[in-house]
Amino acid sequence: MANIYNFSSNVLLKRIGLSPGKKLLVFLISLVAITIPLSNIYNSISLIFFVLICVLSAKKQEISLRFPLLLPILLFGIMVLSLCWSLDSKISLKALGKEASLVFIPLAFILNRRLNRRAVDDILKNYSLAMCLFCLYCIIRATVRYSSSGNIDVFFYHELSGPDLNAIYCSALISLALFEFISRKNKTFWGYIATLFLLIMVFLLSSKNIIIIDVALIIVYYIFFSGLTKKAITITVCLFCLFASALGYYGKIHERIAHEMRPVAVPTDITGVHNVTVGEAWKTDRFTNNHYFNGTAFRAYQIRIFTEMLQEDPIFFNGYGLNTSSIKVDQKAAEHNIFHGSGEVVGYNKYNFHNQYVETFADLGFFGFLIVIIIVLVNLINGLTAKYFVHIAFAVLMISLFLTESFLWRQRGVVFFTLFYCLFNDLRPLSARLLNLLRPNKVKELEQV
C-alpha cells in the first residue's frame, strides 16, 4: 500500500513539473526563507506549498522521529492544551493559527531524509542573496522618501525597515545573512561588498541588542573560526572594532543607542516628560501620562509586573493560556496608571512582555517555559558540537533576542526561528571520531552524499 502511495504521489509531482529530490527541497526551503520579510500572505503560501510537496514526496523508509524536531511540536501541543484553562479561549484559538509553523515545519523535515552540509549551505546562500536584495530595496525606498520629505530619519530604525516589518525583527533576519557572508571562505569582491552592506544595514536599523551580539560574534569568528594567523587576526579584529565604533558613533545611530543606555538618574526634560529609569520602572507604584519608558526601562517594568502576577495568581504550572496574559498586562497597566495611549499613539498597556521566556511562562506556565529553554539549549549545544559558526551565531542571536522580544509569538518570528532551527539541527551527522580518522578529501565526499 505504501509503495502504491509513493508511486502515485511521485507521478503526480512529475506531471506538474516537479521532480522529488534534494534540489526541490533546497528550492522550497529557500522560498520559505526568502519570503519571511515580505507580507505574511506570501510567506504563508510558500510555507503551504513546501509542506504539501513534502507530504506528497514522502517515502516511508525516510521518515524518522528526531528529538530536536519533536520539541517545537511539543511546545505547540502545550499551546493547544492551554485552551482548556485559557482566560479567553477565542483569543488563544486565534493565536494558534500563527503558531502552526511549530508543527508543520518540523513535520515537513521529518517526512524527508536529512539534508547534508552542502544543501544547507546552498539554502543559506540563496537566503543571504535575497536579504541583500531586500536591503537594497529598503535603501531605495528610503531614498525616494527622503527626496520628497527631506527627513533623514527614513534611513534609520523602523522608518528604514518599513511599516510591515519591525526593525528589530528585520535586524535578526539580516544578521543571519551577514553571518553566512562573514563565514564564507575565499570571498569574492562582491562578497566583501555584500558583507559590508549588511553590516551597515544592521547599524542603520539601530537595534542595540543585535548590534552588540553581531559585533561580538564576528570577533569570535575571526579569533576561533577564520583560520588566520595570529597577526592577521589581531589586525582584522582591530580594524573591525574601529569600523564598528565609527558606525556606532554616527549621529542618529549613536542617538538611538544612547537613548537605550541612559544613566540611572535622568531629570524631567523641558517639555515636562519624565524619562523613567530602570530603578523607577521596578519600584514606582503609580505612574502618570508624563512618564516615558525607553525600551530597557519598559522591559524592566514588564518583568516586574510578571513577578506580581506570579504572586497574585496560581499560574506557575499552567499560565493564563496562549496569548491571554495580555489581558492581565492591561489590568496591571490600569493598576499602575501607565500611559494608555491617545489617538493613533499606542499605549504601554497594549504591548506584550517583549521577552520570550517571560511571555511563555505567563501564557503556558513552567512546562512551556522549560520546553523553550530546552529548545534554545539543544540549538546551541548542537551548533557547538558541530563547530558550525553560522549555526552557533544563530543560536546565540536567538537566545539574546528572546530576552528582548516575544519572537515566537509573531508569525515572522516563529517561521524564521522554526525553519532555521530545523534546518541546522537536522543536519546529517558525521561522528567526531570518524571526522578525525578519515582523510579530509574523504570527509568532503561523505558530506556531499
Image (cartoon, grey):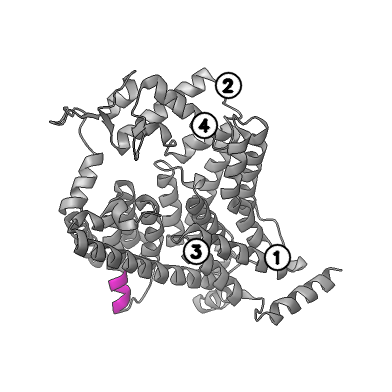
Instruction: Give the CA separation, mark 2 to mark 1.
Output: 42 Å
Tell me: residue 369, above or below residue 383.
Answer: above
Q: Can you tell which mark lies on residue 308?
A: none
Q: Is residue 126 above or below residue 311?
A: below
Q: Secondary structure at mark 3?
A: helix
Q: Is residue 339 something one can see in this rendering?
A: yes
Question: Do callouts 1 and 4 mark residues in contact (Cβ within 8 Å)?
Answer: no
Label 4 neighbour load within 10 Å: few <14, some 14-19, many 20+: many
Spatial separation of the CA atoms under disc 1 and disc 3: 19 Å
Identify the residue shown where x is 51% and y is 23%. 310
Q: Are marks 1 and 3 in contact (CB under 8 Å)?
A: no
Circle 4 sits on which residue?
Answer: 325
Q: Nearer the viewer, mark 2 or mark 4?
A: 4
Q: Quadrant of residue 159?
A: bottom left
Q: Position of residue 144 (x, y in %)?
A: 25, 66
Kindly indicate whether the residue at mark 1 contacts the one at mark 2 (C-beta within 8 angstroms).
Answer: no
Give yes or no for residue 375 being in the magenta stretch.
no
Q: In terms of sequence position, does the residue under pointer 1 or pointer 4 come before the other?
A: 1
Q: Residue type at mark 4: give it.
A: Ser
Q: Which stretch is magenta?
A: 189-194
Amino acid residing under circle 1: Val
From the viewer's perspective, is 155 left or right of 305? left
> Which element is circle 1 on?
helix
**Dot 1 crowding, Cα within 10 Å, few <14, some 14–19, many 20+:** some
Q: Which residue is mark 1?
A: 55
Residue under pointer 3: 33
Looking at the rendering, which quadrant does residue 184 occupy? bottom left
Q: Label 2: which residue?
A: 314
Query: Who comes first in sequence, dot 1 or dot 3?
Result: 3
Secondary structure type for disc 4: helix
* Label 3 vs 2, first from the N-terminus: 3
